[in-house]
Image: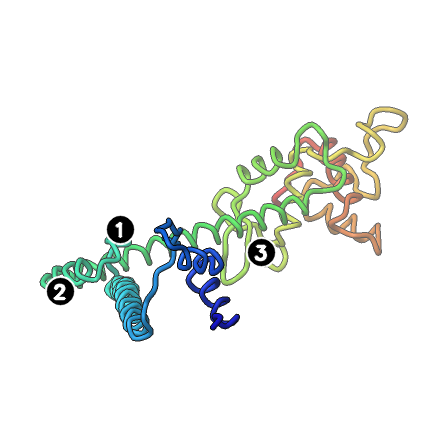
Amino acid sequence: MALKAADKEKLKTVYGFDVDKLVEAITKTEEVDFDIPSDVTVIKTAELETRDANNRQAGKSEGETAGEKKGRELSAKALKKKLALPDTLPNDLDKVIEAAGEQLTKGDDGLKEQIKLLQADKSRLETEKKEVETKARHAVFDSELIGYFPANRTADLTDSERLLLVKANLQFEEHEGKMVVKKNGEIVRDKNSQSPLAVKDVVQSLFAEKKWVQAAGGDGGRGGGDTPPGGGGSGVKKFSQFHEKWAAENPGKDINGPDFQSAVAAHAKTVTDFEWSA
């Protein structure tokens, strides 16, 4: 009786036998060689199930070991952060616990040291903050001062150079919540009201006093003498008098504008004993 085709196919696909050659070898009367596949391993179902169960158990053990290792590492990191331990300490839970124990044995001394370090950091940061704020405030104020410079200022110096000269001649301080200008240690005040003069007015007066402004119509002495433009008079010897006279003769004009600065500068040139602070 012939072998079923399905069994022949199973022998071929599952066990790797060439069935035709196998039948031929079996039917021969003499002994012959038959090539039995050496790369096929036959294992019973029960053995296969046992092997798979063992593999699953081994994989589970490896997974638990890896998970435990990762968990210990994360615990070590969390503990380091909680206790403010150095980052250079390895993320080894046993070593972290050991370091934590050493820190705790310091007791109050260790806590005091930590607090002292934190306070030092706080003080340093507050100092740096104040320095930055002070620099920013000075930069803003310097910008404001330059904004007060007369438009017709001479071009022999840069604004930065002129700013240094202004600060060398005047002192700027907070007084009763308001910025005031001091000259020779005294607050520059209005002669009539005795109120501190505005910073802008004092700065522009200094420019006129130092002749840092260009007189209108040139340097004078050419075609008409040195009579100050816009009013004035050779009999006026005080800044406050010139201020009042010019304002009266030039209604509607800006008393702090370039026209006034030019006028008072030109007038001061013709009056050798002109009093800028009077």
Mark nearer the N terminus (2 vs 3)? 2
Query: How far, Cα to Cα, is label 3 from label 1?
Result: 61 Å
* Secondary structure state at the residue bearing disc 2: helix
Depth order, front residue of 195/31: 31
> Within the image, what quadrant is residue 219 found in?
top right
* Secondary structure state at the residue bearing disc 3: loop
Depth order, front residue of 224/260: 260
Q: Which mark is residue 88?
A: 1
Q: How many other residues sit within 10 Å of disc 1, few (<14), some (14-19) or many (≥20)?
A: few
Q: How many other residues sit within 10 Å of disc 2, few (<14), some (14-19) or many (≥20)?
A: some
Q: Amino acid at mark 3?
A: Pro
* Secondary structure state at the residue bearing disc 1: loop
Mark nearer the N terminus (2 vs 1)? 1
Q: How many other residues sit within 10 Å of disc 3, few (<14), some (14-19) or many (≥20)?
A: some
Question: Is residue 60 positioned above or below 149 on the image?
Answer: below
Question: Is residue 51 positioned above or below 231 on the image?
Answer: below
Depth order, front residue of 184/41: 41
Q: Amino acid at mark 2?
A: Leu
Q: Amino acid at mark 1?
A: Thr
Single out the mark in the foreground, 3 or 1.
Answer: 1
Percent across and percent down for residue 223 are: 90, 26
Q: Which residue is mark 2?
A: 104
Q: Which residue is mark 3?
A: 196
Question: Is residue 11 positioned above or below 253 on the image?
Answer: below
